Image (tube, grey):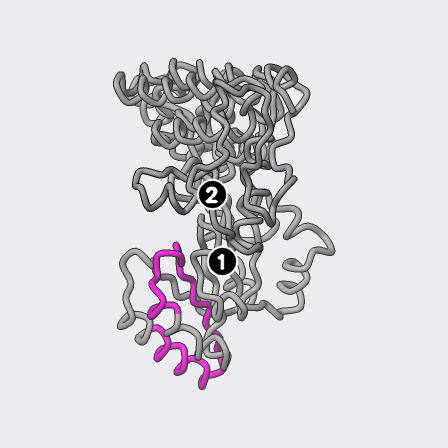
Amino acid sequence: MRPRTLDEYVGQGSLLGPGRALRGALERDAVPSMILWGPPGTGKTTLAEIVARSTGAFFERMSAVSAGVAELRRAVSEAKTRRREGRRTVLFVDEIHRFNKAQQDAILPYVEDGTVTFIGATTENPSFEVNSALLSRARVFVLQPLSDDEIGTIVDRALADEERGFGARGLRLDDEARRVLVGLANGDARAALNALEFAAAAAEQDEAREIGAPLVREAMQRRASRYDKGGDLHYDTISAFIKSVRASDADAAIYWLARMIDGGEDPLFIARRLVILASEDVGLADSNGLTIAVAAQQAAHFVGMPEGFYALAHATLYLATAPKSNSVGRAFSAAAADVANTRNDAVPLHLRNAPTRLMKDLGYGDGYHYAHDDYGVSQANLPENLMGRRYYRPGDRGDEKRRPE
């Protein structure tokens, strides 16, 4: 069911809709080297094939997982021969982020001199995974997960197509089964078609013509997950989690926590972020937040998963609903700035210990007021060049509003 033309291609309207740059380049036969960045099942390989077909170019496909420099050189040598014969080559490298620097560098000269039109596909952020030299010679196009309507269109076509789909078999998908399939596909066309194929085979084995929701659920097993513990979604999701807790949005915070746990995130990574949040964003407005966060880390480590989610959820909801103060971070940052940018004067004599006679004779400890005995007596505790400096400024929420200035 892989689309063969732009008219069959579903999705990515922001790239391929009327008047869009990539569609215009295809129509003008002026396709640049490019990197297609997007999650699985969004049509990266299909789009590369359509580009080659629409421009009459030879499509050379390789996977960065298995290909090496030798295979690249072979592909380039054959592309040079075609070029002399007046035919172009589209060199498509799937999972380009898996090529090392030397392999990526090996492509560069042939992209520059036009021997190949390079198309790389990646699920990872090319800013981090693709060499800057190669990145500067290619346009980056971002592919989005398909919408439920687009997945539905692909599923309906597969059921109706008599040549490449199930149309000749007379199979039907009831409304509930279609809804479940579209929802569990999670914007991934490949996942939807694979599950449909499995369900169709099971239905035919039972001599059934209608595919129901239970069969679809069995075929899909679980929602297609795009979460990657080492990829962009990992960082995007933890960012959403942190910002939701900071914004005191308990519902959003618990949702993003569930997304991370469902994706197999390391529970101790989540716990570390909660401990940081407890001081960074809740701070002295509710100091018990730090106790709760550290306890959650210990509990998650001790209990393990899956039950460890209880402790993480407990801490998440506590911190999300707690009053917020960032005075801890602001105070430390201001003090650290003075440490970095001002002269580091000696510790005042009255604050120094005097364990030896010589130190006492030199005035160490002279004039020190023991706070418990001389409560309320003011003394200088900062170096002389920073006298009167204010770093800690209490907030006006929770426990902190009752703290002295």
Total number of numbered discs in the rendering: 2
- Left or right of residue 70: residue 325: right
Instruction: Give the answer, above or below, for where 43 lies relative to 244.
Output: below
Instruction: Give the answer, above or below, for where 223 lies relative to 288.
Output: below
**Is residue 1 visible in the rendered structure shown here?**
no
Instruction: Give the answer, above or below, for where 339 lies relative to 196.
Output: below
Picture coordinates of residue 327 (x, y %)? 60, 30
Q: Of the two numbered discs 1 and 2 on the same chain, state the one appearing first in sequence.
A: 1
Quadrant housing the C terminus: top right
Label 1 Cα crowd, 10 Å radius (few <14 / some 14-19 / many 20+) = many
Instruction: Give the Cα distance between marks 1 and 2.
Output: 73 Å
Residue closest to the eye, 355 or 302: 355
Q: Amino acid at mark 2?
A: Leu
Residue 95 in the magenta stretch? The answer is: yes
Q: Nearer the viewer, mark 1 or mark 2?
A: 2
Residue 248 in the magenta stretch? The answer is: no
Q: Quarter of the image holding residue 296?
A: top left
Q: Which residue is mark 1?
A: 48
Q: Residue at x 30, y 41 (%)?
A: 356
Picture coordinates of residue 29 (x, y %)? 62, 69
Numbered badge on residue 208: none
Q: Quarter of the image holding residue 197?
A: top left
Picture coordinates of residue 166 (x, y %)? 43, 33
Q: Amino acid at mark 1?
A: Ala
Q: Which residues are magenta?
A: 75-104
Q: Residue at x 63, y 20 (%)?
A: 404
Residue closest to the eye, 42 or 373: 373
Q: Which residue is mark 2?
A: 349
Picture coordinates of residue 81 (x, y %)? 39, 83
- Left or right of residue 388: residue 41: left
**Is residue 57 visible in the rendered structure shown here?**
yes
- Left or right of residue 73: residue 276: right
